Image (spheres, helix red, strand yellow):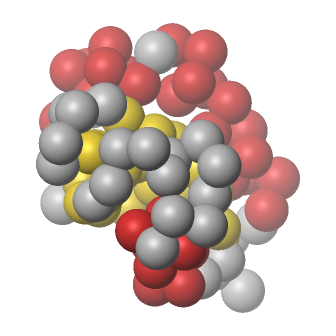
Amino acid sequence: MEFIVYILQSSVTHRYYCGQTDNITERLKRHNNGEVKSTKHSLPWKLIVQISLSSRSESMHLESVIKKRGIQRWLNENQRYLV
């Protein structure tokens, strides 16, 4: 099974959101339908980073690294991952 770490950017506020999932299509729909509490006030969201990993633990670790570093700072240092 494939697990995905993703970063979204709000088209309105230009804020970022980082998460992980095993189904990026459904997860992005949930974000853009206002079903996710932390992102429902900044609709719509666009996918700007998608990194596939082989295990949930790897994806959770990378998500944690990105959030601890700061999403904007991580993006500046890892532009090769931009979609």
Q: Residue 30 is drawn in which quadrant?
A: bottom right
Q: Nearer the viewer, residue 82 or 14?
A: 14
Q: Nearer the viewer, residue 30 or 70?
A: 30
Residue 3, compared with residue 80, is above or below; it is below
User: Residue 58 appears at what percent x and percent y?
Assistant: 72, 51
At a point 51% along the width and 64% down the height, the residue shown is: 34
Q: In the displayed structure, does residue 20 sit left or right of residue 56?
A: left
Quadrant showing the C terminus: bottom left
User: Residue 27 appears at what percent x and percent y?
Assistant: 55, 74
User: Residue 70 appears at what percent x and percent y?
Assistant: 46, 15
At a point 51% along the width and 13% down the height, the residue shown is: 69
User: Residue 36 appears at what percent x and percent y?
Assistant: 62, 58
Quadrant showing the N terminus: bottom right
At a point 52% along the width and 28% down the height, the residue shown is: 66
Residue 19, compared with residue 44, is above or below; it is above
Residue 3, compared with residue 59, is above or below; it is below
Q: In the displayed structure, does residue 27 sit left or right of residue 3?
A: left
At a point 82% along the width and 53% down the height, the residue shown is: 57
Q: Residue 61 is drawn in which quadrant?
A: top right
Question: Would residue 4 be seen by someone viewing this image from the given angle?
Answer: no
